[in-house]
Amino acid sequence: MKSWTNNNQKAPARMLHARLNEDLHRRFRVTVAARDETILVYRAARVAREVEPQGISLSQVNDV
């Protein structure tokens, strides 16, 4: 796997899929919109926060 770079090239990205029932998805969408974020950016930042204690820095999250 390629490492993160400091130039304008983005590192390879991986997809994350989740199945939510309709009501939960609607409430999630509204919650994220209230934060003025996209679901994609919110999820990437949340995953990064969860793994940060394991040595993965938030600075490794790109705006996607």
Image (cartoon, helix red, strand yellow):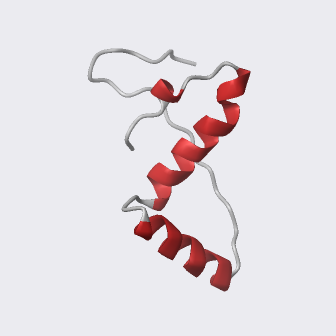
Residue 27 is drawn in which quadrant?
Answer: bottom right
Q: Quadrant of the C terminus?
A: top left
Q: Is residue 19 left or right of residue 32?
A: right
Between 18 and 27, which is closer to the camera in this rendering? 27
Give the image location of residue 18, x and y in percent: 68, 61
Q: Residue at x 70, y 25 (%)?
A: 53
Q: Is residue 6 above or below residue 46?
A: above
- Outermost residue toward the bottom in this view: 23
Q: Is residue 33 above or below residue 48?
A: below
Give the image location of residue 22, x and y in percent: 64, 84
Q: How many marks?
A: 0
Q: Residue at x 64, y 57 (%)?
A: 17
Between 63 and 37, which is closer to the camera in this rendering? 37
Give the image location of residue 31, x and y in percent: 52, 70
- Outermost residue toward the front in this view: 35
Q: Is residue 11 above or below residue 25?
A: above
Q: Is residue 9 left or right of residue 27?
A: left
Q: Quadrant of the N terminus?
A: top right
Residue 8 is drawn in which quadrant?
Answer: top left
Give the image location of residue 13, x and y in percent: 50, 36
Q: Residue at x 61, y 37 (%)?
A: 49
Q: Is residue 30 left or right of residue 50?
A: left
Q: Is residue 24 above or below residue 44?
A: below
